[in-house]
Image (cartoon, grey):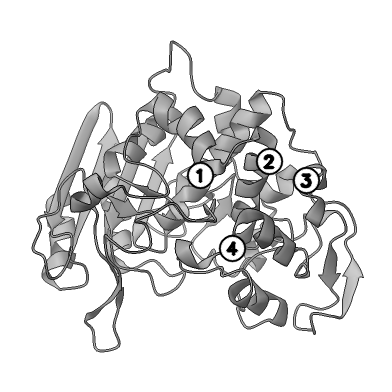
Amino acid sequence: MSTLREVIEKHVHDGSIPGAVALVARDGRVEAVAVGSTGTDDGTPMARDSVFRIASLTKPVVAAAAMLLIEDGRIALDDPVARRLPELAAPVVVRTPDGPVDDVVPASRPITLLDLMTSRAGYGFPSDFSLPAARLLFSDLKQGSPLPRDVAAPDAWMDTLSRIPLLAQPGSEWLYNTCSDILGVLIARVAGQPLPEFLAERIFAPLGMSDTGFTVPAEKRGRFTTLYRPGADGGLVLVDTPAGQWSGMPDFPSGAGGLVSTVDDLYVFARMLLGEGTVDGRRLLTAASVRQMTTDHLTPAQREASGLFTEGQGWGFGGAVDVDTTAPYNVPGRYGWVGGTGTTAHIVPATGTAAIMLSQVEMTGPTPPALMRDFWQYAADA
């Protein structure tokens, strides 16, 4: 069997990534490697504390923040979100998914917190991104690859969202991404403070996640990786530099994909979900809350219709849940997700396994790249 270093080195040597940091922990053993460099030009060696844009790995963190508010008694899963998000008080739904955006019907019921937590509010990416209502998510809301400086502030963003119809009735279909951004706005309004402040106060500081946030201060940019996307010629195309989009606090802190972090900060978060370690003698989230997060909430029909899950996965709160072993690296009950910037983090509650891999090359679609598949296979066999 290959070592973890060999698994990652193969993809650095073939030029598909400049570098990566990976960690697999199980049975008290932690194996971590840093391979390659933080960019193609500067030659700075990748290190265990290198900072990455984690993109959609933000989603489980924001779901955990919502669970904290539920445990505080400040909001409940069956609460209509319009109490805090009046922009969504009277949502409308396109009559047919491929129809014009002005051919709409009223929503059959209010959108609830549970709808947001499970990405079933009716907003989000379908399997066909060309649908008229879906295109508005990209053009008007700037959904898609995270570009923090290009998105409007939360109140203006919600005002724009209020004029975009739902693609499906609340609760009926799983649609990707947008619900987590709405959830981030909801958390801020319920908490009465900006999302970055709430996450820092209630999650990052208590857990010691000192390198996680929505911006990278100047003193840490020497550890910040450069972001690329695959080029048409097989090379890499520059997307963002350490002094770029994350060099200042964004107007819209994206609950769907705005965070940066390190492998060890995400390992601390994974250990929290696994029930390892306490904050002032108690768990940050109760075991019951973690079970809700890491349980599949989709129906078989919703999993089948999602268009993005082709390898035996459902959806919990903020992340996917493996429900069968269609793919050889799937483990029943495995919870976690991937980030479009080339990141992945999962836990397996039954075995106490945590597996995290951070790279800096964007994914080109929902199909996981070979690097991720090889890493998952290694973690499943470890």
Is there CB contact under 8 Å for labels 4 and 1? no
Q: Earlier in the sequence, mark 4 or mark 2?
A: 4
Work out how far the residue at label 2 is from the one at label 1, CA to CA, in angstroms: 19 Å
Work out how far the residue at label 3 is from the one at label 2, CA to CA, in angstroms: 11 Å
Work out how far the residue at label 3 is from the one at label 4, CA to CA, in angstroms: 21 Å
Compare residues 331 and 83 and report the one nearer the observer: 83
Looking at the rendered structure, the secondary structure element under dot 2 is: helix
Q: Which numbered mark, 2 or 1, is in the foreground of this view?
A: 2
Residue denoted by label 4: 152
Q: Position of residue 233 (x, y in %)?
A: 24, 89
Work out how far the residue at label 4 is from the one at label 2, CA to CA, in angstroms: 17 Å
Q: Amino acid at mark 4?
A: Ala
Q: Position of residue 51 (x, y in %)?
A: 27, 49
Work out how far the residue at label 4 is from the one at label 1, CA to CA, in angstroms: 23 Å
Q: Position of residue 106 (x, y in %)?
A: 91, 65
Determine the residue located farthest toward the bottom in the rendered image: 233
Residue denoted by label 1: 60
Q: Position of residue 209 (x, y in %)?
A: 35, 34
Q: Amino acid at mark 3?
A: Val
Residue 288 appears left or right of 334 = right
Identified at 41% across, 64% down, the residue is: 340
Looking at the rendered structure, the secondary structure element under dot 4 is: loop
Work out how far the residue at label 1 is from the one at label 3, CA to CA, in angstroms: 19 Å
Residue denoted by label 3: 81
Q: Earlier in the sequence, mark 1 or mark 3?
A: 1
